[in-house]
Image: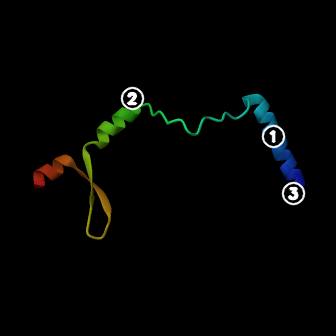
Amino acid sequence: MAHVVDRFMSLTDRLRFFFGPATRLDSESPVVHKHDAFEQASEEELSHFVVETDAAGHHYAVRREDLEKQG
């Protein structure tokens, strides 16, 4: 078992040498979320749906236009 651990540690040392040490960010700083074009397109597409819950507690999506037709 010690041989496996030694090989693993040797591998991680070589990877650290190649990629550099792991960066440690400030955990207290707020996360900045940047929207890219794909994420904007996904949000636009999902904005056409509403999540409904039935009496049994199951969740499902309904198109907004279908809700407008019903009510």
Q: Earlier in the sequence, mark 3 or mark 2?
A: 3
Q: Quadrant of the N terminus?
A: bottom right
Q: Where residue 48 sits in the image (x, y, percent)?
A: 25, 43
Q: Tag 3: residue type?
A: Met
Res 26 label: none
Residue 26 lies in what quarter of the image?
A: top right
Q: Is residue 16 above or below residue 57?
A: above
Q: Are marks 1 and 3 in contact (CB under 8 Å)?
A: no
Q: Residues within 10 Å of mark 2 (few under 14, many from 20)?
A: few
Q: Earlier in the sequence, mark 1 or mark 2?
A: 1
Residue visible at 89% across and 54% down in the picture = 2
**What is the CA distance from the residue labelled 1 to the residue labelled 3?**
16 Å
Q: Is residue 42 left or right of residue 24?
A: left
Q: Quadrant of the C terminus?
A: bottom left
Residue 12 lies in what quarter of the image?
A: top right
Q: Which type of secondary structure does the marked residue at label 2 adopt?
A: helix
Q: Residues within 10 Å of mark 1 (few under 14, many from 20)?
A: few
**What is the CA distance from the residue labelled 3 to the residue labelled 2?**
49 Å
Residue visible at 81% across and 37% down in the picture = 13
Q: Tag 1: residue type?
A: Leu
**What is the CA distance from the residue labelled 1 to the residue labelled 2?**
38 Å
Residue placed under numbered mark 3 in the picture: 1
Residue visible at 67% across and 33% down in the picture = 23
Res 37 label: 2
Q: Tag 2: residue type?
A: Ala
Q: Earlier in the sequence, mark 1 or mark 3?
A: 3
How many numbered discs, if any?
3
**Colouring:** rainbow
Q: Is residue 49 left or right of residue 29?
A: left
Q: Where residue 11 sits in the image (x, y, percent)?
A: 81, 40
* Residue closest to the eye, 61 or 34: 34
Residue placed under numbered mark 1 in the picture: 11
